[in-house]
Image: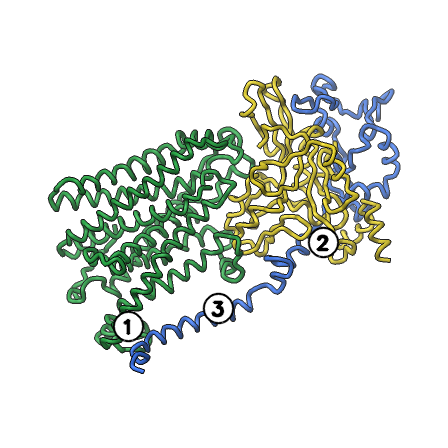
Chain colours: A yellow, B blue, C green
């Protein structure tokens, strides 16, 4: 009985099984989820990103992110062929409303979505003085809003600028990789709503996940590899000027 | 003996410190959350609490359970890979109670431009237009069918 | 975006650590520095600085009592700060704070002051009346033994505590430097020199403060300033300041020579947004000027009056310079983007929980506490303790 259920979930990435538990809002009742069987990350297929901002809006709607703060955002890079080390970057309102026409159409222009990298060696959880933020056993960096002091040390320690203090709760906040969705068989709000498939949730511990084939066959990078954080958000065809 | 007598005040001080330490340990026993440390240096219950947050986007599988007709229209068109809520917005409440909660009507003149307005940073092969010149404010579904956006003879509506 | 030049990651625009977090290392630095000065007499047998010994201890205590307040006020949830004692996270430098602080407060400062004043406390508990008598009686812990043997034990115990106290003072402030120095995400902070620079700048500021306080209080009490004492303190201030300056220059030269990926961005910041506070106030007015003034007193034979004036000026400049140094570390480290593509602006509130008025209040508060402490435990020789003037020993 148990085995068939698990097989079902593997075969159908669909959430139909879990949906009734989703509506009930009781995660303990989502029966097929075991922490030790997952190791979450994400793939960003940059050549597919069109900078529509759907991910930013979806994230805000799903997670009630306050205006002016971002769990995910989109940057637009302009790289001149005469000065490739000094890109010009903009991200008006995090790309939430899309982007105005590029000022300079010469050179290279492209979009880069950003979110928490869910680092396995995360500098943010390292510095938390009380254990209010942590890497869960399934590889997601989470914040416990009932335990966070609001000392802001983690915000300082994140090399990627992914954390902020929610002005409503006065606690640290960040991308949870839609933990309330992925533990029920759904994908994240940003991936669900990306119209081009540029963002794909990846379960690195699941051998059937297409991420493994992708990593084998593509030129993939993480942001700021010199930080050695073992980031788990992989960028396909990442330009060297991106930081 | 005399040394002990003359250092008596130090023992009193040590007693104050020990009393303070004991009080601290007792208070600590009461205040540390029960589930703290079960999975790591954090409150294990926090994981379940975060997982229990409400869902806003139902996910396309939920939509497809009822709207099989739309799925049929989409599946061979250019928008086959675009999930329902990417355009229609978060519909978990609608999926929960389809009769009581109805999705809003969409304005294709605004909606389509989010993706298809021309921008130099978009991939070259992505279909994009200068809407001001292309449709001059007309809603896109005047000519295109949104679920399978080829041009429809005589208009989509 | 107002106040933003170039590109910041969107969550970086708002500064996380305010002027209160500038104040925090400044205050703890004064504590550590004042204690080191006190230990000069006790452990290193520098007899000349004896008149400042007790004053230095009381100064350290009053500043230490205030030091956690800016942290507390800045927390999003101050009511949860006890969690740092309950479940300290071993990998977090900040989690150490609660324990280092308590250790330093209770096991070092309070203990050393208590042992040093015990004879006086016992005498005062017998001679005073009313509520004062009650306070002193509690402070005796019910033991009135001030026999020669008991006092000799106290003397030995006090010496031991001072010996333990010196590394503790280094720990207290070195760890504050480590809080910043260990953040690899921030190239302005991330350097192994940070704790060392913090320790030396702490000694500089603490010694300068006690020197100023000693001169001011002695003048207010219409007593004669012990010039041998002040000269010695100023000489130590000069030596340590030279070491501190060398370390800071070493850091600077290293950064300029290595010129890593962050250099262009940081260099531009120092020459624009930080120019006034870093180049002008910290380096020129707050470091080079006082070192030059103190150096002058070392080489030239000057009259007592001239030396006093120079010491006063150098002390004030030093405190200003060290405060600017804390400002440039804490605020400067948040003005540039971790993308190295832009800069933001710090807007300090006036009447806010983390505003200017609060910062001023927290700076004055230790002096008020010191005033009370000096009343309760007079730091001067007991013969003159009856004639405490009402003049406030504030700056």
Q: From the viewer's perspective, is B42 left or right of C152? A: right
Q: From the viewer's perspective, is A171 left or right of C117? A: right
Task: Provide the chain ID for the residue under circle 3.
Answer: B
Task: Kindly tell me whether residue A54 is visible in this rendering.
Answer: yes
Residue A36 numbered tag: 2
Residue carrying label 1: C153
Q: From the viewer's perspective, is B38 left or right of C294? A: right
Q: Secondary structure at mark 3?
A: helix
Closest to the observer, A64 or C153 = C153
Residue carrying label 3: B24
Residue at image point 82% right, 49% down = A9
Structural crowding at the residue carrying mark 1, measured as other residues with C-alpha within 10 Å and reported as few (<14), some (14–19) or many (≥20): some
Q: From the viewer's perspective, is A16 left or right of B38? A: right
Structural crowding at the residue carrying mark 3, measured as other residues with C-alpha within 10 Å and reported as few (<14), some (14–19) or many (≥20): few
Whether pointer 3 and pointer 2 mark residues with C-beta atoms closer than 8 Å, the reply is no
What separation in Å lies between label 3 and label 2 (alpha carbons)? 36 Å
- Compared with B156, C164 (above or below) is below
Measured as percent of width and height from the top left, residue B52 is found at: 70, 54
Task: Provide the chain ID for the residue under circle 2.
Answer: A
Q: Secondary structure at mark 2?
A: helix
Task: Kindly tell me whether residue C351 is visible in this rendering.
Answer: no
What separation in Å lies between label 1 and label 3 (alpha carbons)? 29 Å
Measured as percent of width and height from the top left, residue C359 is found at: 37, 48
In this rendering, which labeled residue sits more in front, label 3 or label 2? 2
Closest to the observer, C374 or A156 = A156
Task: Provide the chain ID for the residue under circle 1.
Answer: C
Closest to the observer, C140 or C146 = C146
In this rendering, which labeled residue sits more in front, label 2 or label 1? 1
Measured as percent of width and height from the top left, residue C184 is found at: 51, 42
Q: How many marks?
A: 3
């Amino acid at each position: 009985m148990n085995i068939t259920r698990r097989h079902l979930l593997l075969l159908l990435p669909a959430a139909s099984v879990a949906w009734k538990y989703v509506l009930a809002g009781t995660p303990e009742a989502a029966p097929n989820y075991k922490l030790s069987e997952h190791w979450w990350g994400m793939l960003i297929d940059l050549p597919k990103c069109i900078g529509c901002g759907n991910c930013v809006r979806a994230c805000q709607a799903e997670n009630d992110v306050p205006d002016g703060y971002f769990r995910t955002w989109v940057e637009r890079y302009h790289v001149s062929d005469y000065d490739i080390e000094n890109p010009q970057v903009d991200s008006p309102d995090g790309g939430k409303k899309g982007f105005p026409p590029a000022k300079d159409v010469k050179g290279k222009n492209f979009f880069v979505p950003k979110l928490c990298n869910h680092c396995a060696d995360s500098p943010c959880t390292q510095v938390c003085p009380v254990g209010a933020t942590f890497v869960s056993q399934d590889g997601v960096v989470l914040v416990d809003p009932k335990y966070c002091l609001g000392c802001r040390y983690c915000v300082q320690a994140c090399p990627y600028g992914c954390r902020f203090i929610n002005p409503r709760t006065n606690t640290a906040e960040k991308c949870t990789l839609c933990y309330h969705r992925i533990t029920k068989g759904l994908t994240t709000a940003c991936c669900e709503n990306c119209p081009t498939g540029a963002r794909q949730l990846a379960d690195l511990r699941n051998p059937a996940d297409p991420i493994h084939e992708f990593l084998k066959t593509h030129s993939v990078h993480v942001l700021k590899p010199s930080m050695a954080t073992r980031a788990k958000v992989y960028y396909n065809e990442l330009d060297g000027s991106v930081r | 003996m005399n040394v002990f007598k003359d250092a008596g005040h130090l023992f009193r001080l040590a007693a104050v410190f020990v009393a303070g330490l004991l009080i601290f340990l007792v208070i600590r026993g009461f205040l540390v959350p029960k589930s703290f440390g079960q999975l790591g240096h954090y409150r294990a219950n926090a994981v379940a609490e975060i997982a229990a947050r409400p869902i806003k986007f139902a996910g396309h599988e939920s939509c497809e359970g009822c709207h099989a007709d739309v799925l049929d229209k989409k599946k061979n068109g250019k928008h086959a890979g675009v999930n329902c809520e990417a355009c229609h917005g978060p519909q978990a409440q609608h999926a929960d109670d389809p009769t009581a909660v109805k999705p809003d009507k969409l304005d294709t003149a605004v909606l389509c431009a989010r993706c298809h307005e021309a921008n130099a940073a978009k991939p070259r092969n992505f279909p994009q237009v200068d809407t001001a010149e292309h449709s001059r404010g007309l809603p896109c579904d005047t000519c295109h069918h949104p679920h399978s956006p080829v041009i429809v003879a005589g208009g989509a509506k | 975006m107002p106040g933003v030049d170039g590109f910041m990651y969107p969550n970086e625009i708002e500064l996380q650590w305010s002027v209160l977090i500038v104040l925090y290392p400044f205050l703890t630095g004064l504590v550590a520095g004042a204690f080191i000065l006190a230990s000069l007499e006790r452990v290193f047998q520098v007899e000349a600085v004896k008149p400042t010994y007790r004053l230095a201890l009381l100064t350290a205590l009053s500043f230490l009592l205030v030091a956690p307040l800016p942290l507390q006020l800045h927390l999003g949830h101050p009511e949860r700060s006890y969690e740092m004692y309950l479940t300290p996270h071993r990998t977090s430098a900040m989690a150490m704070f609660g324990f280092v602080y308590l250790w330093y407060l209770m096991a070092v400062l309070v203990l050393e002051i208590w042992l040093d004043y015990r004879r006086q406390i016992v005498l005062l508990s017998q001679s005073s009346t009313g509520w004062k008598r009650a306070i002193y009686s509690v402070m005796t812990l019910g033991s009135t033994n001030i026999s020669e043997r008991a006092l000799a034990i106290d003397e030995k115990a006090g010496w031991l505590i001072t010996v333990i106290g010196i590394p503790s003072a280094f720990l207290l402030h070195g760890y504050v430097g480590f809080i910043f120095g260990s953040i690899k995400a921030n190239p302005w902070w991330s350097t192994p020199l940070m704790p060392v620079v913090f320790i030396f700048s702490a000694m500089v500021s603490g010694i300068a403060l006690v020197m100023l306080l000693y001169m001011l209080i002695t003048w207010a009490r219409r007593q004669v300033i012990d010039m041998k004492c002040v000269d010695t303190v100023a000489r130590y201030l000069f030596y340590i300041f030279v070491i501190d300056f060398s370390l800071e220059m070493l850091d600077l030269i290293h950064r300029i020579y290595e010129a890593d990926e962050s250099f262009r961005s940081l260099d531009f910041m120092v020459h624009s947004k930080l120019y006034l506070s870093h180049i002008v106030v910290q380096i020129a007015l707050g470091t080079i000027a006082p070192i030059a003034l103190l150096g002058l007193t070392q080489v030239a034979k000057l009259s007592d009056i001239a030396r006093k004036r120079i010491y006063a000026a150098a002390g004030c400049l030093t405190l200003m310079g060290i405060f600017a140094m804390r400002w440039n570390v804490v605020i400067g480290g948040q003005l540039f983007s971790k993308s190295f593509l832009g800069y933001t602006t710090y807007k300090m509130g006036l009447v806010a929980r983390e505003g200017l008025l609060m910062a001023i209040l927290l700076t004055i508060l230790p002096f008020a506490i010191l005033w009370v402490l000096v009343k309760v435990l007079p730091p001067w020789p007991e013969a003159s303790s009856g004639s405490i003037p009402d003049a406030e020993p504030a700056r």
